[in-house]
Image (spheres, helix red, strand yellow):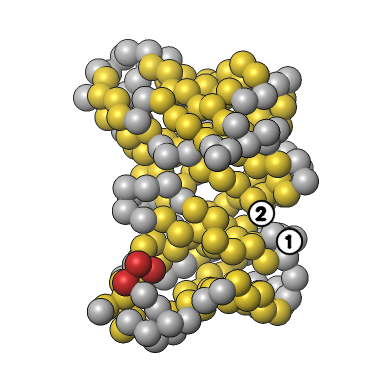
Amino acid sequence: QKEVEQNSGPLSVPEGAIASLNCTYSDRGSQSFFWYRQYSGKSPELIMSIYSNGDKEDGRFTAQLNKASQYVSLLIRDSQPSDSATYLCAVNKRGGGGADGLTFGKGTHLIIQP
Amino acid sequence: DADVTQTPRNRITKTGKRIMLECSQTKGHDRMYWYRQDPGLGLRLIYYSFDVKDINKGEISDGYSVSRQAQAKFSLSLESAIPNQTALYFCATSDFGRPYEQYFGPGTRLTVT
């Protein structure tokens, strides 16, 4: 099983609709979860972090975490063409002999259709 | 604005050459990271450093070395470049208090011919 899994897409959503992006992870010990946005040819940009079960809202973005199901999601309300990008899910990877840092999914390519 | 910068932004080099990629940051963060990104493989951690005296291998460190010259500077070297090291390389930083909230530089596109 891959450590962090995302559907690569493309996910096509009409402008103004809600875009829903999903991510599953394999390490039950992970405690920190992030969503990064990456425009083509640019660097990843941190847009959301979530550390506890439930929802966290920031403007048009809502991150949802369900540790029991090992599932993280990102909702984008009132989608805009400028939201078209690749969204990377990232999960902390604890040390203990392995690399300490973030493990990234391969990303979901989101397209907002005007 | 506090920032993460990388030089060069683009580099083409030949097989067997030594090359250094440099990263500087003005965020005041203590932790620095080097990643590479390949189509279909995502972001993978090469090396990371928690302070000047602390260097750690990531998941794909073979063929690479690093130097942490100062808190704000972290360099990645390819001692003898090979074509499969062609990739987009990113430096990232994070703060001790929020170690997993990482901030990325603009990237270096490296091509090894």
Mark 2 chain: A
Of the pair A8 and B106, the residue shown nearer to us: B106
Judged from the image, the secondary structure of the residue bearing numbered disc 2 is strand
Residue, disc 1: A31
Q: Quadrant of residue B37?
A: top left
Residue A91 position, x and y percent, is 62, 58
Residue, disc 2: A92
**Label 2 is placed on what type of residue?**
Asn
Of the pair B81 and A38, the residue shown nearer to us: A38
Residue at x 60% of width, y 32% of height: B26
Residue B49 is tagged as: none
The answer to whether residue B98 of the structure is visible from this angle is yes
In the image as oriented, which residue stretches furthest toward the left?
Answer: B113
Is label 2 in contact with label 1 (beta carbons under 8 Å)? Answer: yes
Q: Check the image and report above or below for A54 versus B12.
A: below
Asked if marks 2 and 1 fall on the same chain, the answer is: yes
Judged from the image, the secondary structure of the residue bearing numbered disc 1 is loop
Residue B25 position, x and y percent, is 57, 31
Q: Check the image and report above or below for A17 versus B98.
A: below
Residue B63 position, x and y percent, is 46, 23
Residue A39 position, x and y percent, is 36, 56
- Categorize mark 2 by other alpha carbons within 10 Å: few (<14), some (14-19), many (20+): many
- Left or right of residue A80: residue A6: right
